[in-house]
Image: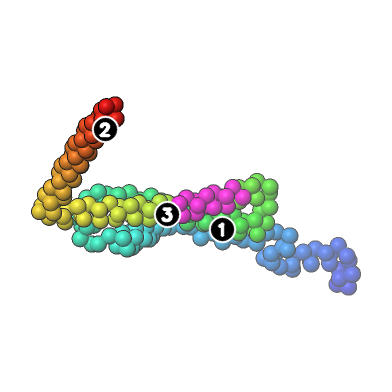
Amino acid sequence: MDTTDKKEDPIRRSIDDLLNEDVTAPSSNLPSFNEHTPMDYVQVKETSTNSAKKLMNSLLKFYLSQDIIAKNEYIQLKAKIDVMTMSNLIFQMQTAEHAITTLMRSIDAGEVSPRMFEVLGGLQKTMLDIMKHQTLHMMAAEENMKKLKRDIDIYSDQQAIPIEAKSASSNVNRGTRNLMKEIQAELGNEESELSDEDFDSEKQSEL
């Protein structure tokens, strides 16, 4: 068989085409490669703690003076608990956001099973709940600071009253009680005098 017959043979041409085809070219029917960036959880936790500390310190300084914060142990311990709670909420929100982003990228890459959408919807609902808890915790912390400031102001005002003023106030109270006793005594005497006069007038009318 000569060269002309080889070129005209359809089977030979199909084999040559397969051998010369570029096998490295990606097929359009396959999903694209999904590049996944891992999350540095240690760094995220540290960032969440720093954000919570800045937030709670700003709240403390807005309602209370630095001197009161430094001297009151209860305020310091309560602030630590609030920082720990807020940092956990921020961390959970960031990790949930990362998981949602990863699932959405997987779905865009071609993983469109119903289970993927079910998990994605659950994560989105969880993230909304975390955001709601974060807002409620912040509102509760602010209300507690307001109440604490009012209590400290009332206690400071009571401590600032001098001893002379307190004794004068007690004397006023005693004087008020004595005055009421004297008034009641005078009213009793007037009633007795009136009763005597009424008795005399009744006696004269009988005569």
Q: Residue at x 67, y 59 (%)?
A: 31
Residue at image coords 33%, 52%: 147
**Which residue does the numbered mark 3 point to in the structure image?**
139
Residue 152 x, y percent position in the rendering:
25, 53
Residue at figure coordinates x 50%, y 54% from the top left: 131
Identify residue for label 1.
101
Region in magenta: 121-136
Q: Residues within 10 Å of mark 3 (few under 14, many from 20)?
A: few
The residue pinned by badge 2 equals: 201
Magenta-drawn stretch contains 135: yes
Q: Position of residue 54 (x, y in %)?
A: 34, 62
Which of 24/182 is in front?
182
Report the front residue among 63 and 136. 63
Amino acid type at image mark 2 = Ser
Does the CB distance between marks 2 and 3 fall below 8 Å?
no
Q: Is residue 18 left or right of residue 117?
A: right
Q: Give, as a three-letter code, the residue at label 1.
A: Thr
Looking at the image, residue 131 sits to the left or right of residue 104; the answer is left
- Classify residue 204 as left or right of residue 168: right
Q: Quadrant of residue 2?
A: bottom right
Q: Secondary structure at mark 2?
A: helix
Residue 27 visible: yes
Which SS type dominates the magenta stretch?
A: helix
